[in-house]
Amino acid sequence: MSVSSETTAPVLLRKIRSAAYRFKTFVRSQRFGMSPDAIYDGAFYDGGAFDKTEETARHVVHYLIRTYAPRSVLDIGCGKGSYLRHFADAGCLAVGCEGSIEGIRRVPSPATAFQFDLRRPLRLNRRFSLTMCIEVAEHIPSNASETLVESVCRHAEDVIVFSAAPPSESGTDHINCRPKEFWHGLFLRQGWRPNIEETAQLCAFSRAEGLPQWWREWTHVYRKQ
């Protein structure tokens, strides 16, 4: 084997492995009907994005309690319960749902969480004074977008806090990244309007605290029309 072929072989092997990984990631997706359990494993919940969430949750929950004084909180797509834990510690009724059992296993007490596939309508037969859905919508197939927003609004009593990754934002199974106007339109159909002043205050707080980009730039507060 020549020197050039000895050099080329490892490079080619790395490219093949990289292509295989990208293909596996592409097909292991809700766009092809895969369940959340098959996509979001333990490594996903123990990885980098949730490290940021753990650091962020205490600051965000303190702000939301100070601003809205919620008695009860529903976190739709609660991950491993980072926000729920701080709400529960503050005395709120804290309830969440998550698509993967790996997330549910990591939710700490005294918060309550259950597994649910958000491609389907969520019906709990009660409302919560604060309803959250943070960085979930981009993981939901586009044909379930309205179903998700309906589920959020159905359980909201006073305030909705919602964020979704915008177009071209990379991430695990980001299959439904939309501009904010798309989500605003779906909330308006349900009778909820983005509150410009409260959204600006939340984003300003997030910038001052150095919170992740989704809190600084694409989280919105909605109020009933």
Image (tube, rainbow, N blue to C red):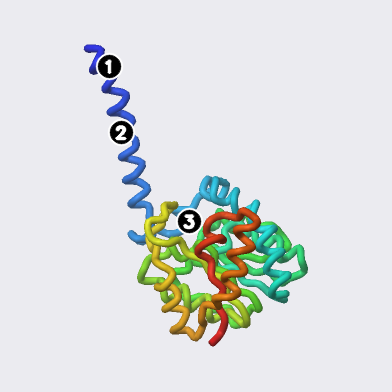
Amino acid type, label 2: Lys
Q: Left or right of 84: which side holds 214?
A: left
Q: Nearer the viewer, mark 3 or mark 2?
A: 2
28 and 88: which is toward the camera: 88
The answer for how far apart the CA atoms under marks 3 and 1 are is 41 Å
Residue linked to disc 2: 15
Q: Are marks 1 and 2 in contact (CB under 8 Å)?
A: no
Name which quarter of the figure residue 124 lies in.
bottom right
Work out whether 74 lies above or below 79.
below
Measured in 3D between alpha carbons, the distance from the residue under mark 1 to the one under mark 2, in whole angstroms, is 15 Å
Q: Which residue is mark 1?
A: 6
Q: Position of residue 107 (x, y in %)?
A: 64, 57
Mark 3 or mark 2: which comes first in sequence? 2
- Tag 3: residue type? Asp
Nearer to the camera, 193 or 175: 193
Q: Residue 28: percent from the left, percent from the top?
A: 37, 52
Residue in front for this viewpoint, 159 or 75: 159
Q: SS for tag 1?
A: helix
The quadrant of the rendering that contains the N terminus is top left
Q: Which residue: 59% across, 50% down?
A: 52
Local secondary structure at mark 2: helix
Q: Earlier in the sequence, mark 1 or mark 2?
A: 1
Quadrant of res 58:
bottom right
Q: CA distance from mark 3 to mark 2?
A: 28 Å
For discs 3 and 1, the disc positioned in front in the rendered view: 1
Q: Residue 37 got which mark?
A: 3
Amino acid residing under circle 1: Glu
